[in-house]
Amino acid sequence: MVRIEKLHKSYVTGSNSLHVLKGIDVEINKGEMVSIMGSSGSGKSTLLNIIGILDNYDEGGYYLDGELIKNMSEAKAAIHRNRTLGFVFQQFNLISFKNALENVALPLYYQKISRKKRNIIAMEYLDKMGLRDWAHHMPNELSGGQKQRIAIARSLISKPKVILADEPTGALDTTISYEVMDILKEINADGITMIIVTHEHDIAEMTQRIIRLKDGIIESNVTNGKKKQVAAV
Amino acid sequence: MFDIDLYREIWQAITKNKMRSTLTAFGVFWGIFMLVALAGAGKGFQNGINKQLEGFATNAAFMWTEPTTVPYNGFKKGRSWSYDNADMEAVLHHVPEIEYLVPRLEAYKQSSVNNCVYKDKYGTFQVQGDYPDLANVQPFKMARGRFLNDMDIKNNRKVCVIGSRVEEVLFTNGENPIGKYMRVSGVYFQIVGVTSPDGNIQIGADKKESVQIPFTTVQQTFNYGDIVHYFSFTAKKDYSVSDIENRVMEILKKRNDIAPKDNSAVGHVNIEKQFMIMKYLFMGINGLTYLVGLGTLLAGIIGISNIMLVIVKERTKEIGIKRALGATPYNIIRQIIMESTILTLSAGYVGLILGILLNEALGVALQGTMSEVLLNPGIDLKAGLTALFILVVAGALAGLLPASKAVKVKPIDAIREE
């Protein structure tokens, strides 16, 4: 589903160049649930952003569902983000002046689906998250766990192939974190590829594979439970 | 498809910071308001002047005599002189481009205090000797009766045409003056017509207070011999009066022993030149109007563009989230441009309407006043639509820079923006 070959990425600020990703090779199969771990500055978020086509890269290749994603036009990238990818962020990133229902329905707006139709679909997804009664509340009236479930519903509504979650439990307490992880596992069970960036071991333990990054290279790539070491590059 | 969500978002964005939106919109409002108010007033001023000049022969010149300023042919300078009938014939003969040549006598001696008497009423009015052709140079309407005609001239008839003020003073109880005899400087004349006070521009005395007598009658009755005080003439079609003016003056100077280089002996006014001056004046007023109005409008639009930059900056994160959810650059740019266009257009529309209302109010307030300086002020439909079109384009342009800035940022940088 996601194939990355010899990926390099540097951030240039003025005369300083910061080499963040130094040759990443990784493949994530369809239906897998993978976590990317690493200390801050290891490049894990950068990698996720590149996979999400929110950021570009300098060298190497990134294939999403077999298609090379490189120097892609913003218009084409928007279609991929809308149809193939779903995002879950640490800070939820709900749009503050739209209510829960409108937030969930937003990706369908960009697919030019009529307001009536997309509100019906959005309500179904809110129902799945157990938030039907909160549909017309504004984000600032909701708890962190509720907000994250709304964000997950929003990421699912366009039936993406891959969900990208950047520290999805980072702003939540343990109980709520585990609830959110259960939801993500359920989604994964439906066949959607799941890539989670986290620095919490207990969260990573819930995924099928853990990819550890250190200083821009893959330190280890371990399938959970089997404790089998996959050759690091 | 009418995209209700788009308009809801635009409305939300504009009303989120009402004070800021209002102040920003005020710049555009004021620009358009100024433009419309000034252009309308300018137009009204022009209408007013044009109304007064209505029918006036623009291809006309007027000449009278002034004391000489250069000694010539044995005459000292400072000599007073007059034209005579022969001068008129000579001018007509030598300058065939002249269409009408209308001499006049300003009978000052007969215009002394209480010179006009009818029964027990009397008043002081200006007595003039005129030709029927006067109507072709400075047209006027008759309120009653007729103007002087060729038979009056030919037969030296003792008839007269009076102005509206003369009628008011001498015929107080609604008596019809036509056919009545009034005494002018001791001589009785039969009244054949009363001129209408309509139209304002005239050369010489105020026609409302004039008593016009056939030219030949005045010369004979009041002992003016063959003197002509003043004359007006128009050029034939396709000739410019400015071109023949000098030739006429040369002829007059030569016949009356005036030094060719004496530039003040022949007093003259060229209406064509006056009209050109008026035309340039209007052009100047219009130019100034548009300079000030468009300048203010431009400042307002720059203000909009500026505030859109701030709005876009404030909403960077929101825009980033939307792009992560699949908003294309087109979606983003469209929304920002629509926002700035709607802000500009609504502000401009209010300015346009208020500007037009102000002009209408001025028009009503000044209607029927003596001056009629502003006649039907206001802008025409075409100018109004042009202004609206300019607003739409300007609003879109004002949004373009902020919009392109908004999509230039990488989505991830936008999302991380706090």
Image (cartoon, coloured by chain):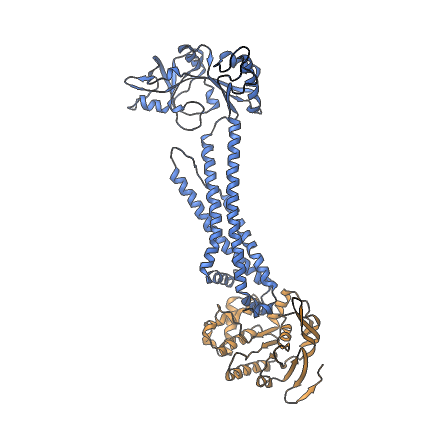
Q: Is residue B92 visible?
A: no
Residue A35 in the figure: left or right of residue B252: right
Give residue A107's position: percent from left, percent from top.
Answer: 56, 69
Residue A101 versus residue B404 in the image, above or below: below
Residue B331 versus residue B354 in the image, above or below: below
> Which residue is nearer to you in this view: B316 or B119?
B316
Chain appearing in blue on the rendered image? B
> Which residue is nearer to you in this view: A36 or B155?
A36
Question: What shade has chain A been given?
Answer: orange
Give residue B184's position: percent from left, percent from top.
Answer: 35, 15
Residue at 51% over, 44% down: B292
Residue B23 in the figure: left or right of residue B192: right
Residue B239 in the figure: left or right of residue B159: right
Residue at 51% over, 39% down: B286
Quarter in which the C terminus of chain B is drawn: bottom right
Q: How many marks?
A: 0
Q: Quadrant of residue B412?
A: bottom right
Give residue B303's position: percent from left, percent from top.
Answer: 51, 54
> Which residue is nearer to you in this view: B198 or A92?
A92
Furthest toward the bottom, the residue is A226
Give residue B3's position: percent from left, percent from top.
Answer: 52, 61
Residue B63 versus residue B363 in the image, above or below: above
Q: Is residue B264 visible?
A: yes
